[in-house]
Amino acid sequence: MLVNSLQILDISLGISLSYLTIVFLIRLILTWYPKIELSKGLWLLISIPSSSILNLTRKLIPPIGGVDVGPVIWIGIISFLREILVGQQGLIKLALHTNIS
């Protein structure tokens, strides 16, 4: 039972963190195109999961020289978490291997 739960957690967390990385990469690219409205159409798939997080980050770290560094910070944080949790030597992978053996 525990192995199945860990496998589901591993897959779902990996997919979620990958999706967030892609979202923040797109948000980073969209900072070069300020005329795009994120509140319309498919842009909502990018805007909804990232706007509140980026607003919090902007309060803590204001834009530097007019450039929003929030997406870069979150890409780094998410990549770190993904590697620590579901990477090849991640905690969940190690737990899976010790429970299977």
Image: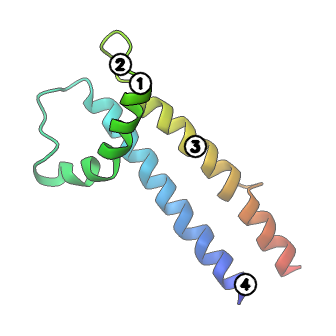
| Residue at the limit of the structure toward the front, as seen here | 59
Image position, residue 36 (x, y; %): 13, 34
According to the image, label 4 marks what residue?
A: 2
Residue 18 located left or right of residue 47:
right
- How crowded pointer 4 is (Cα within 10 Å; few <14, some 14-19, many 20+) is rated as few
Q: Nearer the viewer, mark 2 or mark 3?
A: 2
Q: Distance between the residues labelled 1 and 2?
A: 6 Å
Q: Residue flagged by tag 1: what amino acid is it?
A: Val
Residue 37 located left or right of residue 45:
left
| Residue at the limit of the structure toward the top, as seen here | 65
Q: Distance between the residues labelled 2 and 3?
A: 22 Å
Q: Nearer the viewer, mark 1 or mark 2?
A: 2
Image position, residue 76 (x, y; %): 55, 35
Question: Which residue is at 38% across, 38% downward?
Answer: 56
Q: How far apart are marks 2 and 4 (CA)?
A: 44 Å
Q: Nearer the viewer, mark 3 or mark 1?
A: 1
Tell which circle, 1 or 4, labels the residue nearer the N-terminal end.
4
Quarter-wise, where is residue 19 in the image?
A: bottom left
Under circle 4, the secondary element is helix
Tell which circle, 2 or 4, labels the residue nearer the N-terminal end.
4
Under circle 2, the secondary element is loop
Q: Residue flagged by tag 2: what amino acid is it?
A: Pro
**101 over 69 or under it: above or below:** below
According to the image, label 2 marks what residue?
A: 63
Quarter-wise, where is residue 31 in the image?
A: top left
According to the image, label 3 marks what residue?
A: 79
Question: Which residue is at 36% across, 29% downward?
Answer: 58
Q: How far apart are marks 3 and 1 (CA)?
A: 16 Å
According to the image, label 1 marks what residue?
A: 69
| Residue at the limit of the structure toward the right, as seen here | 101
